[in-house]
Amino acid sequence: MRISKGALLVVIAVLVPFVVEFRTALSWFGIELSVLESLVLGGAVVLAIVLWAVWPPNGNAEAELSGPN
Amino acid sequence: MEVTRMSSTASRTYLDQFPAEAKVIKAAFWSSFMALAIGGLLGLVQALHRTDVLRFIDPADYYTVLTAHGVLLAITFTIFFLVGIFTWAVTTSLDRGVVDIRFTWAWYIMMVVGTILVGVSILGGVVDAIPTYADVLFTFYAPLQAHPAFYVGLVLFVVGSWLAGADWFRTWWAWRKENPDERIPLPTFMALTTTLFWYLCTLGVALSILVFLLPWSLGIVDSVNPLLTRTLFWYFGHAVVYFWLMPAYMMWYIMLPKLSGGKLFSDPLARVVFVLFLLLSTPVGIHHQYLDPGIAEGYKFIAMTNTMFLLLPSLLTAFTVVASMEHGARQRGGTGYLGWLKALPWRDPVFTGMALAGLMFAAAGFSGMINAGMNINYLVHNSWWVVGHFHLTVGTAVALTFMAAAYWFIPQVTGKALWSRQLALGQVLLWFVGMTFMSNAMHRSGLFGMPRRTAEPQYQGFNFEPAVGTVGEINAQVALGAVLLTVALAMFLLNMVLTSFNDDSDSLPANTYAGTLSGPEDSPAVLDNLKLWTAIAVVLVIVGYTLPLASIVDSGGLFGPDISGFQLAIETDPALVLESVREVMP
């Protein structure tokens, strides 16, 4: 993992106010997201962050799994 | 000097160093936690009632619950924790115990007795067997009137806190005799400056209670001047915000840098910040009264100017604390413009709780600027916005910092290891998320005028659009936030209880606080001149308050134009209901 599980949890928690406030901020520009759309957006960002966190840093999953020789 | 002192006490917990003081601090913390448990639970009752998710109390009882929630959390929880932290700070940084531990127990017991009187007075509103009432809300000014026991309890609690301050001063004076040429250690300096403005601001509320509200409640005087009691309350009511906040600031200054792996960036800057709070905390209360008729706009403008100056110490704090955290992160191998953030100890609940509390406080600062602006305040005054604001300040910046600090302090004063770090980490994150949902919805609804302090606001049967979404969504978001916060509170209390019964006492951290990159030797000695800063603070109070108070007394009289007050209650006499129905349906 690129970051620890604890740090990943913190990143996801800190993301919550950004998603919630992003919805509020967008409305001032005339873009109104429904609750469902906000949830989907938030879920997508969380998924992207989790994938980034668990993906091996060099992008080579096989090498990561087999470990150094 | 500080680093040397700390190294001599390395690997020893506070309990090892000061066993007698540790007992008082532990008692103060548990008093604080009990207030937090009851007050927090009542917060859930309120949130579910107002949002119409679950209503099992009478609408009139909502205000009893609201009063208990406000008083127990804003006064009892915060100040009991504060006296614990400040006693720790003074004894640890001076490296000596209090002068007389019996005196320390005396002020603690006085505060407990005061709390019991206040609590019983409030609960009398919902328990028929208790002949008291105090549905006066946290702000308790006229014309709402409480049972005399409520005011007596408040007086005992505040006098207890005064004596606690006297205890810290006595301890410092004793240390100064032994160390005449030493600068005041930073944690003690923070405790003493905070105590000084507490003395200054509580004079207003003491005057309000002892001269007006208590005699009025006892029937000794027939009436009071509501605007006068209100102004005296707010004379204290804004400074109390900083009284809660200063222990949190202290934690951010002297614990966060250490937890980050480094040192405090600047001791002199920290002293300047606390001096500024001593000067400016009190002459700002009129900014809570922008909509009060009877106070001239010019006085309100002075209060606004003073309030805006208060942004300076908060911004200095943001700079100093973040710089200290960056220093710590780089000591731990962090690199890059923002990459150092990854090197911080995010798995440590003490660090993460305090850091997230600080982050939320930044948001609270922005909504606070809006509250403080005279013109824009009219938009949000007495709306749910204000509730959202102070749930970010006292409800997160203070409460979350205190809970995170408790994960470090309870092991220090009990000698028992924290029961679960994972649970603690989950708890601080859940509190942060829960408060995000709740405060965002409150701010949004307040912008469109949804009122605070309303048991059952009705938004059906007409077209009303709050900022983003619907009223239903806002209610759901507040209810969700309240439930998450209650779960987080239960997790915190569970961890504290199980820690107290934990047999594991291994690998406890030593009782230390952060050293400094730039120490007291780099700051001018005048910063430690407490008499000078107190005198200036008094002058500012005189400038800010003499003319408004004289004007209020001149126009409304010292004891008011025959205001007899009332006790908040809603009678549900069936005969009255029938009479009302007949009036509209003849």
Image (spheres, coloured by chain):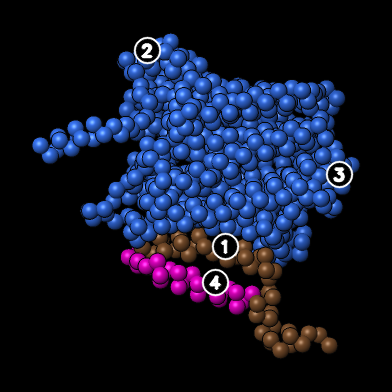
**Badge 2: few (under 14), some or many (20 or more) residues near its Cα, within 10 Å?**
some
Dot placed on the residue nearer the N-terminal end, 1 or 4: 1
Question: Which residue occupies the extreme top position in the image?
Answer: B220
Foreground pick, B290 / B421: B421
CB under 8 Å between discs 2 and 3: no
Please name the amino acid that badge 3 sits on.
Answer: Arg
Q: Residue B222 carries which label?
A: 2
Residue B142 visible (yes or no):
yes
- Secondary structure under badge 3? loop
Cα distance, mark 4 to mark 2? 63 Å
Rounded to the nearest angstrom, the CA distance separating label 2 from label 3 is 59 Å
**What residue lies at 39% left-to-right and 32% top-to-bottom?**
B289
- Residue that appears at 29% across and 56% down: B465
- Is B463 situated above or below B133? below
Q: Disc 4 marks which residue?
A: A46
Residue at the spot x=78%, y=42% of the render?
Answer: B414
**Residue toward you, B511 or B148:** B148
Residue placed furthest toward the right: B8
Give yes or no for residue A32 being in the magenta stretch. yes
Q: Chain B is drawn in which colour?
A: blue
Classed neighbour count for the residue bearing mark 3: other residues with Cα under 10 Å, few (<14), some (14–19), many (≥20): some
Q: Chain A is drawn in which colour?
A: brown
Q: Name the residue under label 1.
A: A13
Query: Which is more foreground, mark 2 or mark 3?
Result: 2
Query: Which secondary structure lies at badge 2?
Result: loop
Confirm whether circles 4 and 3 share one chain: no
Q: What stretch is highlighted in magenta?
A: A29-53
Circle 2: residue type:
Asp
Q: Give the x, y percent position of residue B141.
A: 43, 26
Mark 1–mark 4 contact, CB under 8 Å?
no
**Residue B103 sits inside the magenta stretch:** no
